[in-house]
Image (tube, rainbow, N blue to C red):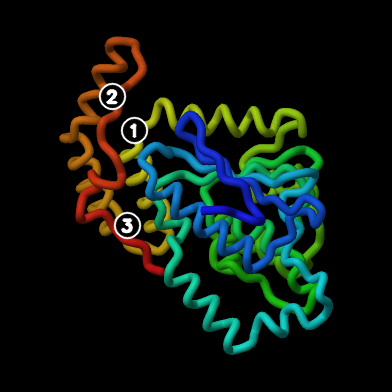
Amino acid sequence: MTYEQIRYDVSDRIATITLNRPDRLNAYTAVMGEELAAAFAAAEGDDGVRVIVVTGAGRGFCAGADIADGPTQFERAGDAARQAAVQAQRAASVRPWEMTKPIIAAINGAAAGVGITMTLQWDIRIAAESAKIAFAFVRRGVIPEALSTWILPRVIGLSGAAELLYSGRTITAREALEFGVVSRVVPDGDLATTVRLLAADIADNAAPVAVAITKRLLWHHLTETDLQRAEAVEARLFGWAGAQPDAREGVRAFLDKRSPNWTMQPSTDLPDFLPRGKS
């Protein structure tokens, strides 16, 4: 696929998606959303990809929705035709939390509105020291979206989510770390290397099927309220995983002091009883 507003590259089993509208601080458009969904689907369907990294071109990550057309931007977004198109796009897209590949956000600059809420649907967020983050919706007269009112309280707690979503204020990367919105803050010049090293560590050393199952359990258990059911699901999957070729290879590689040679793939080797998302 040819992309207009993102770049998509794969090397060393890492897919890097770069939001590519640097002249607009990578402001989000419908085209960008469609291309991002297509890139996720491409990475998900490629057994040569084990980790996905998303970052922004230039000095911004994503400055939120592109509102250059003026105050009717959000009004048009609520049109019946637009809503139907959005629903159709969602139905055809793979949900980030249902994917088998970890997604890491490398927040290299401003991340506002959808520029931060979409990353909540991913797995890991690492920010550059100079990055600024804002859940600015209420300051534009609209409400938070992209499932942020569901995910953010589960990530950082109700009180912290309320402070950020009710005020819409801009916070620094360090404040985002204190709230728990991001897991790490690094000097600007170290961001790309830091994220690449983490992605490479997962891609090189972690069994892809084991990672896929672990990701599915993390997201699935956000909606599981019964500890016994959660324990039963996890125990069944642990027993299944322990009897697979990758478990034997993991032990042999550890004892032999060598890198593992994983042979199982998420596209073909996931158990049929793995919980599905509740989207």
Element on which disc 2 rests: helix
Q: SS class of the residue under badge 1? A: loop
Checking the image for residue 207, the label placed there is: 1
Q: Nearer the viewer, residue 252 or 232?
A: 252
Residue 94 percent across, percent down from the top left: 43, 61
Which mark lies nearer to you, 3 or 2?
Answer: 2
Label 1 Cα neighbours within 10 Å, binned few <14 / some 14-19 / many ≥20: many
- What whole-number distance in Å separates the C-alpha atoms at marks 3 and 2? 29 Å
Residue occupied by mark 2:
250
**Residue 31, percent across and down?**
63, 65
- In primary-sequence order, the first of circles 2 and 1 is 1
Q: Is residue 80 left or right of residue 242?
A: right
* The one of 233 and 202 positioned closer to us in this rendering: 202
Query: Measured from the top left, where is residue 71 in percent x and y?
Result: 82, 80
Vertical arrangement, residue 143 with respect to residue 104, above or below:
below
- Tell me the CA gap for discs 3 and 1: 26 Å
Residue at image point 66% right, 51% down: 19
Q: Are marks 2 and 1 in contact (CB under 8 Å)?
A: yes
Mark 2, other Cα within 10 Å: few <14 / some 14–19 / many ≥20: some
Mark identifier at residue 73: none
